[in-house]
């Protein structure tokens, strides 16, 4: 919580407080308005009845991934690396491919969650083990993300008002829980639409305000030239092929992970909330467009922030520590907007915060309710009971997130490691499970287990044992990605080939429903043989 | 552009074809050019506007290629959806493998 050393001199006028209270009331009220729709069924509480036009879940994709910590993170990388830092945000480009591949396949499966999809794609014991593991892990991850973004809100409130961080952490998330508890996903997606519009407008206003506070576009370009910092406008300014803190090798690895990751499912942490939006879209076409346009809006937002932060750099070029410059975009809003507009800005920060919190409250509750409680404990539970379990799970997630948020400083390093676990060694299995019929549940399960041990070994133990200094090539995250991918394959490929393929009945059923891309020849031929798909001759 | 197909039967639309590959490539390039182009356009740089324009053209092209196929896939799939949803609920309740 390094940023806690910064406290601004923001003073709120009556007009500022009017904006904040009005927005908060409007957001909560509009979400709660959908109480009647949310309580109709499990499908309504968690997927808005699978009937949304593409632009509604698209706004939710955008709003969810605009969190209170996002501008801090973008500010950090742009201030440090110039416009080239925007590639750090390009991990979300997996949606460029996913929107037309894995989104299409997943929407056709109709699975509520990725955990449920495991039991459609795989069969028997490994599928059930995977479903239970993934559901538990997602409940934990959603609680962690809630704690993380809640603490970011605590930082912002401390910076703006000098409040202790726990106030920002608890008060606004609790307000958000009100409409998530009452209306479920209907409340989330309707409030997200409103919050997304408000947030985008304010990001536009504040960012251009920052650019003009720095003298305007032409002046920024000229000043960067005078300062010998023109490289900051070059998005391809790398420090070498393998050397420096921004090498081309990192860029290549990132593009590889992001773009080809779209062929798979779960190759990005963002897949899990996106999966819920995909299933809430009314058709396959709506699902594809909601992912594509929602992500594009996020990228345009990043571009706006990047431009504003380059302006911020021109204004404050000598900030040495990340903890000081990561609040740059917030400083533009709080320090440069005129009185009466600051409250509007803070209301937009609330919109940004609430949209993320609401998604993760509902998503974590979905995994608990559908994949743990209903599937393993009460398979025949009536709808009313399921809805109440969903609400109780939402409340437990909220309280758990306060706990995580308060201890975040101590556990951050370990949890970033947990995120790394997920991204590296199971990246390839996440792609193969979609593309390759022979990849089975034991293979996928073994990749998760192996990755757990291998990641510890590669990221922590080996560099320590060999005494490798910081900056050594083996300690670079992009190197470790490739090493983990190769080592993981040495485990899951033998396991896959030494165990039986999934039963053909199971695979045919999945194939006919989902029509996956890739190497599915034997399954396709079997489906044609059984008369479930037309043969080439019949088509012609 | 006769090499890009824009009329589909439901069975043909379910197959993965070159139109899907073209869409993936155009979509990725559109993301890159729109993001970088927008950021550079904020500084009124001519190459920023050019990149942004390329991104808009790619986006329109991508939709032109894939939209007819997606429409057919969606209408065909919706007819089957109710049956699949029943199977999903049976699986959830351990009534079906």
Image: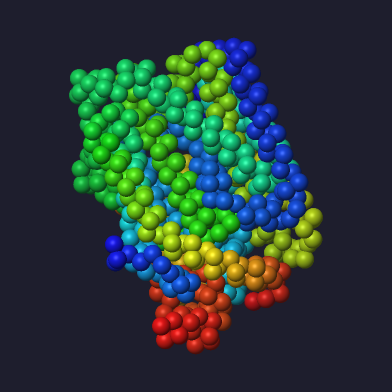
In the foreground, A96 or A121 = A96
In the foreground, A171 or B61 = B61
Residue A123 in percent (x, y) is at 58, 74
Above or below residue A34? Residue A132 is below
In the foreground, B3 or A156 = B3
Q: Residue at x 34, y 42 (%)?
A: B34
Do we see residue A394 in this rendering? no
In the picture, measured across the screen, residue A529 lies left or right of residue A375, that is: left
Q: Residue at x 63, y 27 (%)?
A: A23
Do we see residue B38 in this rendering? yes
In the picture, measured across the screen, residue A214 lies left or right of residue A534, that is: left
Residue A382 in percent (x, y) is at 79, 61
In the foreground, A165 or A270 = A270
Residue A527 in percent (x, y) is at 50, 82
Above or below residue A84? Residue A132 is below
In the picture, measured across the screen, residue A469 lies left or right of residue A518, that is: left
Residue A462 in percent (x, y) is at 36, 53
Q: Residue at x 41, y 21 (%)?
A: A209
Q: Quadrant of residue A125?
A: bottom right
Color theme of the render = rainbow
Above or below residue A398? Residue A123 is below
Q: Residue at x 50, y 80 (%)?
A: A533
For the C terminus of chain A, which image quadrant?
A: bottom left
């Amino acid at each position: 919580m390094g940023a806690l050393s910064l406290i601004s001199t923001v003073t709120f006028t009556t007009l500022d407080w009017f904006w904040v209270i009005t927005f908060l009331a409007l957001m909560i009220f509009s979400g709660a308005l959908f109480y009647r729709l949310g309580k109709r069924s499990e499908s309504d509480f968690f997927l808005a009845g699978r009937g949304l036009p593409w632009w509604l879940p698209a706004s939710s994709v955008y709003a969810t991934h605009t969190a209170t910590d996002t501008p801090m993170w973008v500010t950090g990388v742009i201030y440090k690396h110039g416009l080239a830092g925007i590639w750090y945000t390009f991990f979300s480009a997996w949606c460029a491919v996913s929107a037309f591949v894995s989104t299409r396949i997943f929407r056709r499966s109709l699975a509520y969650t990725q955990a449920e999809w495991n039991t459609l794609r795989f069969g028997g014991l490994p599928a059930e083990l995977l479903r239970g593991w993934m559901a538990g892990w997602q409940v934990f991850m959603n609680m962690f993300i809630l704690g993380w973004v809640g603490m970011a809100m605590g930082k912002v409130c401390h910076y703006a008002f000098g409040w202790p961080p726990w106030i920002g952490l608890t008060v606004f998330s609790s307000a958000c829980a009100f409409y998530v508890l009452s209306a479920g996903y209907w409340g989330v997606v309707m409030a997200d639409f409103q919050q997304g519009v408000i947030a985008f407008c304010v990001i536009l206003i504040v960012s251009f305000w920052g650019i003009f506070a720095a003298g305007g576009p032409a002046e920024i370009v000229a000043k960067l030239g005078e300062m010998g910092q023109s490289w900051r406008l070059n998005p391809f300014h790398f420090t070498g092929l393998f050397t420096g803190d921004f090498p081309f090798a990192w860029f290549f690895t990132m593009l590889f992970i992001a773009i080809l990751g779209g062929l798979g499912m779960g190759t990005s942490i963002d897949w899990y909330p996106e999966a819920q939006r995909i299933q809430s879209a009314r058709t396959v076409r709506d699902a594809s467009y909601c992912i594509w346009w929602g992500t594009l809006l996020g990228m345009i937002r990043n571009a706006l922030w990047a431009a504003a932060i380059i302006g911020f750099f021109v204004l404050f070029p000598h900030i040495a520590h990340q903890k000081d410059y990561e609040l740059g975009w917030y400083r533009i809003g709080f320090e440069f907007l005129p009185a009466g507009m600051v409250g509007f800005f803070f209301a937009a920060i609330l919109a940004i915060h609430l949209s993320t919190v609401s998604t993760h409250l509902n998503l974590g509750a979905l995994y608990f309710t559908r994949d743990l409680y209903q599937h393993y404990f009460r398979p025949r539970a009536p709808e009313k009971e399921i809805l109440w379990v969903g609400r109780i799970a939402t409340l437990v997630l909220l309280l758990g997130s306060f706990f995580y948020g308060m201890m975040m400083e101590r556990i951050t390093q370990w949890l970033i490691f947990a995120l790394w676990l997920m991204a590296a060694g199971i990246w390839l299995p996440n792609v193969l499970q979609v593309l390759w019929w022979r990849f089975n549940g034991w293979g996928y399960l073994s990749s998760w287990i192996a990755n757990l041990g291998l990641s510890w070994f590669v990221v922590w133990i080996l560099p320590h044992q060999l005494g490798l200094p910081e900056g050594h090539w083996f300690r670079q995250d992009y190197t470790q990605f490739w090493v983990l991918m190769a080592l993981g394959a040495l485990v899951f490929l033998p396991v896959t080939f030494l165990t039986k393929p999934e039963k053909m009945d199971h695979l045919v059923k999945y194939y006919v429903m989902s029509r996956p891309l890739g190497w599915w020849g034997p399954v396709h031929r079997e489906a044609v043989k059984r008369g479930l798909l037309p043969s080439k001759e019949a088509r012609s | 552009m006769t090499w890009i197909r824009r009329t589909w039967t439901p069975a043909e639309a379910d197959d993965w074809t070159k139109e899907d590959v073209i869409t993936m490539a155009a979509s990725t390039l559109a993301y890159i050019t729109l993001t970088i182009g927008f950021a550079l356009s904020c500084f009124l740089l001519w190459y920023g506007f050019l990149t942004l324009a390329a991104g808009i053209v790619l986006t329109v092209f991508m939709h032109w290629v894939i939209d007819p196929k997606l429409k057919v896939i969606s209408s065909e799939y919706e007819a089957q959806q109710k049956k699949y949803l029943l199977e999903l609920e049976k699986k959830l309740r351990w009534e079906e493998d």
